[in-house]
Image (spheres, rainbow, N blue to C red):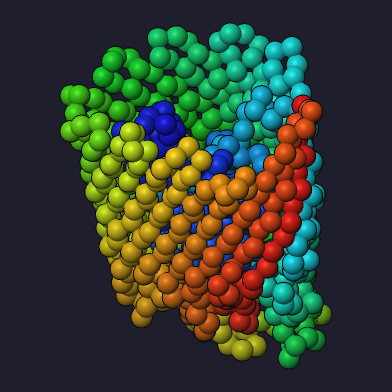
């Protein structure tokens, strides 16, 4: 069952969109220690690290350090950076131990999740606190200065349960300069049932970290670094009304704060450092009503108010908060026309005060289920990007003694959202008696009004500045699949693959950022009482998008990881020891535009976990 495509719980073969589910079992078998890395299991995804502090994840390419075409939500709360539109993955106060499952909608999901869901949505669902009762302590250490301590304790109340977690970690990604990072996180989740029809979830969290390099996108010197602080509060109240009806009310607040000085390049070291401090926040309230009014019709209706605020004087045109008030109204309907045919219709209507514009994002899908084994889906959808407040308000200046010497970047304030029109044909084969499932998707995307900088004349010292404009149209045709097979209760594998052909009218700027092929394989099997899992990840050649041009460095890799774990029962719990070796085939190339050549080299770590009642 999946929830992410329309807010209606439905089997994957009845969903209006393609959905990949990353399970708790897959997360544990992978040996990954960072949340963003598990997205490698999704067909078409590229995960890269510009440094130890700055991971990036993209779908179907368009790969740069600040990708803003995917919406990321944790238990219904959006976590993207309102300034730049991307996600600061390392600053999310969330550990992999908290995660129950991840649902990734492959294709525009703006009809359900609004702007920023242009290429899809990543919905992360954390574990109910009743699932993590008792205590847990884990330590891990390995190559590249990797160290991690993870603590958790959960208990019960009269009408509910709760969990408190704390994690501290530090590591280096590539073993080069601008690469060391560390962070500490604390999180709380409480689940309560004051009456037999009411469920209340409360979440709180905070994260504090340090990273060499930067979070603001400008890195000129090896001695640059940044500190970040982030936190959130999330409250959801759900009431069951009976007869298949329920409503929920969700209130949330998220903030991110960055402390950073951008040092000028060595030849211009006489210029003043650029104060790159910023503070962003998002607050929202959402009401959702779900109903199954008849046996053949299910609907959802949702309304939301959201306030985004950004304070970033170094990149914005004002020394005060820039605000965007968002009003959203969305709805979805699932109509069982007959036992074999299902018609889906959904749309999101939203108003943004920053642009004083109204946006409509529709989706239609038709599912045909000729049997319990085979199902087909035909879908059409449109979506748009939210850009982030940065692109419409940019004003970056380098000064000397307070006087403007170089107007580096300047916004026109007249940008249109980037837009996508997508059509797809899906096929699902499901054979429970074989424990076998196959999900295939063929798609066509047309993306236009892409936003990128161009250089124009300007009356400053060098006579030039860069401005953001809408330019560029991209077309993509692709095929992707995901296969799941469990030949025995203890043995299983998940195989994902994609092929994408991309064209653009910008001399290949965007096409070069899209690998023509991606592949991932995760398999697990016990051997002599030891749980053994192997992960293989392949990305075809690509170049991360840089400033005004693709990176001069090519990225591609074939990566093989191995995890071996064994556990022992104790009187009050269990102990697990694990060894993980990554990049067994050699280095993985992941070089961004503003760094030199970077390689993820072979490394390993050991972990010891104790869970008790």
Identity of the residue drawn at 53% across and 62% down = 47
Query: Which residue is nearer to you in this view: 575 or 391?
Result: 575
Image coords of residue 550 (percent x, y): 48, 78
Q: Position of residue 322 (x, y in %)?
A: 63, 52
**Nearer to us in this view, 139 or 518:** 139
Q: Is residue 76 above or below residue 407?
A: above
Q: In the image, residue 207 lies at what x, y percent?
A: 75, 48
- On the rendered structure, is 115 left or right of 610? left
Tell me the quarter of the image containing the N terminus: top left
Can the viewer see residue 306 in this picture?
Answer: no
What residue lies at 27% left-to-right and 46% top-to-bottom? 426
Residue at the farthest bottom position: 267
Whether residue 372 sits left or right of residue 127 in the image: it is left
Looking at the image, which residue is at 64% across and 71% down? Answer: 602
- Residue 508 to residue 379: above or below: below
Comparing 59 with 69, the one in front is: 59
């Amino acid at each position: 069952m999946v929830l992410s495509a329309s807010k209606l719980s439905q089997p994957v073969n009845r969903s209006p969109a393609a959905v990949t589910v990353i399970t708790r079992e897959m997360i544990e078998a992978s040996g990954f220690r960072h949340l963003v890395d598990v997205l490698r299991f999704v067909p078409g995804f590229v995960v890269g690290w510009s440094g130890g502090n700055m991971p990036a994840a993209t779908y179907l390419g368009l790969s740069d350090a600040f990708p803003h075409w995917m919406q990321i939500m944790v238990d219904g709360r959006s976590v993207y950076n309102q300034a730049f539109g991307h996600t600061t993955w390392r600053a999310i106060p969330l550990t992999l131990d908290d995660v129950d499952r991840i649902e990734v909608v492959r294709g525009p999901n703006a009809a359900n999740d609004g702007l920023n869901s242009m290429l899809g949505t990543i919905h992360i669902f954390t574990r109910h606190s009743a699932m993590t009762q008792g205590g847990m302590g884990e330590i891990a250490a390995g190559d590249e200065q990797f160290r991690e301590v993870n603590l958790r304790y959960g208990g019960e109340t009269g009408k509910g349960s709760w969990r408190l977690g704390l994690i501290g970690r530090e590591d280096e990604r590539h073993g080069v300069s601008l690469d060391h990072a560390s962070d500490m996180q604390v999180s709380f989740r409480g689940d309560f049932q004051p009456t037999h029809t009411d469920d209340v979830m409360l979440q709180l969290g905070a994260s504090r970290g340090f990273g060499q390099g930067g979070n603001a996108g400008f890195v000129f010197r090896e001695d640059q670094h940044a500190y970040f602080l982030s936190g959130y509060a999330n409250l959801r109240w759900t009431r069951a009304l009976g007869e298949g009806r329920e409503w929920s009310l969700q209130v949330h607040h998220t903030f991110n704060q960055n402390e950073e000085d951008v040092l000028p390049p060595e030849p211009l070291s006489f210029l003043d450092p650029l104060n790159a401090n910023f503070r962003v926040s998002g607050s929202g309230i959402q009401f959702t009503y779900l109903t199954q009014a008849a046996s053949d019709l299910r609907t959802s209706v949702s309304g939301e108010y959201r306030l985004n605020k950004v304070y970033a004087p170094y990149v914005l045109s004002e020394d005060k908060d820039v605000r965007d008030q968002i009003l959203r109204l969305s709805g979805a309907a699932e109509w069982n026309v007959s036992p074999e045919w299902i018609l889906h219709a959904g749309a999101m209507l939203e108003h943004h005060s920053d642009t004083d514009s109204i946006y409509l994002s529709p989706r239609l899908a038709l599912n045909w289920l000729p049997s319990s084994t085979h199902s087909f889906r035909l879908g059409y959808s449109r979506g748009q990007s939210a850009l982030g407040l940065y692109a419409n308000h940019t004003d970056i200046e380098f000064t000397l003694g307070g006087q403007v010497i170089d107007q580096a970047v300047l916004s026109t304030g007249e940008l249109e959202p980037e837009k996508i029109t997508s059509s797809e044909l899906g096929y699902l084969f499901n054979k429970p008696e074989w424990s076998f499932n196959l999900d295939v998707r063929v798609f066509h995307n047309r993306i236009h009004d892409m936003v990128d900088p161009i250089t124009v004349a300007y009356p400053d010292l060098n006579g030039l500045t860069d401005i953001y404009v809408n330019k560029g149209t991209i077309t993509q045709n692709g095929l992707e699949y995901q296969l799941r097979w469990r030949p025995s209760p203890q043995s299983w594998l998940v195989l994902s693959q994609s092929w994408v052909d991309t064209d653009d009218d910008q001399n290949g700027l965007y096409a070069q950022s899209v690998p023509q092929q991606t592949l991932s394989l995760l398999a697990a099997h016990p051997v002599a009482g030891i749980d053994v899992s192997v992960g293989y990840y392949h990305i075809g050649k690509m170049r991360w998008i840089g400033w005004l041009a693709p990176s001069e460095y090519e990225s591609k890799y074939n990566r093989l990881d191995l995890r071996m774990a064994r556990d022992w029962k104790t009187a009050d719990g269990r102990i697990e020891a694990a060894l993980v070796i990554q990049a067994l085939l050699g280095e993985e190339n992941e070089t961004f535009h503003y760094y030199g050549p970077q390689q993820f080299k072979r490394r390993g770590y050991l972990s010891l976990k104790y869970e008790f009642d």
